[in-house]
């Protein structure tokens, strides 16, 4: 459905090490998708179903100071048309559109405040349905740290049809605005970034069964816990993390 997040990539400097780290933390397996004729790309799978991708940090991105990071894909019906609309609304095109034959047509873009994401039109027919919400190892929440969430909200509302859900007052940190992408439940939230977060970006939360055990797997694998565990409405527990190569991610679970 247009406007939904449906895939995720992590850019890494060492693919084998990243595959082991996320496999140990989240129970994913990693399988190379390349045939030797193009850029290396691995797929993370959970129970045989694709969850996310793993790719080398692009050289041109690294030369400009880019670091390992997670990026999300938003489903669109027509990638080429959406690129034009994004640019007309003040967003930027960074790469594409281009096609992986028989798989996907995609483009790398950013919103008017610089938060990067991908838009994509899948070309695979009869793809299996996604796993049930909350399944450990799946992506459970999408969080935009914006320069000014109020100013950037109309961009996503107009282009992708997102609607506001409830807003949470976080005191000095401002408003945490939940949003829906077409379903009955909120898919994520956006907020104005605090000073310690240097740039606007999207962050992603991975579902786990229990937050303490998952956090221990992060540190055992060489990652870092940046914040938490912290209880949030639901009730749920979260931790904000960094993998051993510097990519930020978060975990969310129903118990400690």
Image (spheres, helix red, strand yellow):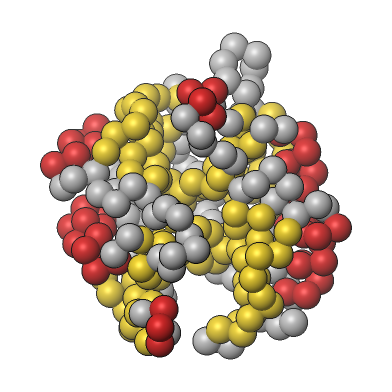
Which image quadrant is residue 207 in?
A: bottom right
Q: Position of residue 215 (x, y in %)?
A: 76, 67
In the image: residue 108, left or right of residue 226: left
Q: Position of residue 29 (x, y in %)?
A: 75, 45
For the point 40% across and 45% down, which residue is it?
117
In the image: residue 133, left or right of residue 229: left
Q: Which image quarter is the C terminus in? A: bottom right
Q: Is residue 136 visible?
A: no
Which image quadrant is residue 95 in?
A: top left
Q: Residue furthest front?
A: 195
For the point 24% across and 69% down, which residue is it?
150
Q: Residue furthest right?
A: 220
Q: Nearer the viewer, residue 69 or 85?
A: 69
In the image: residue 168, left or right of residue 38: left
Q: Which image quarter is the N terminus in? A: bottom left
Q: Position of residue 135 (x, y in %)?
A: 64, 67
Whether residue 218 is situated above or below residue 116 in the rendered picture = below
């Amino acid at each position: 459905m247009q406007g939904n997040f449906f895939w995720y990539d992590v850019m890494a400097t060492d693919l084998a090490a990243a595959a082991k780290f996320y496999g140990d933390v989240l129970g994913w397996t990693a399988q190379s998708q390349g045939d030797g004729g193009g850029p290396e790309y691995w797929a993370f799978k959970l129970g045989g179903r694709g969850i996310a991708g793993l790719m080398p940090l692009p050289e041109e991105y690294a030369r400009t100071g880019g670091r390992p990071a997670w990026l999300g894909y938003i489903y669109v019906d027509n990638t080429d048309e959406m690129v034009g609309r994004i640019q007309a609304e003040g967003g930027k095109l960074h790469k594409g559109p281009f096609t992986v034959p028989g798989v996907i047509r995609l483009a790398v873009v950013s919103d008017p405040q610089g938060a990067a994401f991908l838009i994509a039109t899948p070309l695979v027919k009869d793809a299996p349905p996604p796993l049930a919400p909350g399944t450990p190892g799946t992506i459970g929440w999408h969080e935009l740290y914006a320069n000014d969430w109020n100013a950037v909200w109309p961009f996503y509302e107009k282009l992708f049809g997102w609607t506001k859900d409830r807003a949470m007052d976080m005191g000095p940190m401002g408003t945490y605005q939940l949003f829906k992408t077409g379903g009955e439940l909120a898919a994520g939230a956006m907020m104005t970034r605090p000073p310690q977060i240097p740039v606007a970006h999207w962050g992603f939360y991975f579902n786990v069964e229990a937050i303490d055990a998952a956090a221990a797997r992060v540190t055992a694998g060489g990652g870092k816990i940046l914040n938490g565990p912290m209880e949030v409405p639901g009730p749920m527990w979260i931790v904000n993390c960094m993998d051993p190569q510097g990519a930020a991610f978060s975990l969310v679970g129903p118990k400690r």
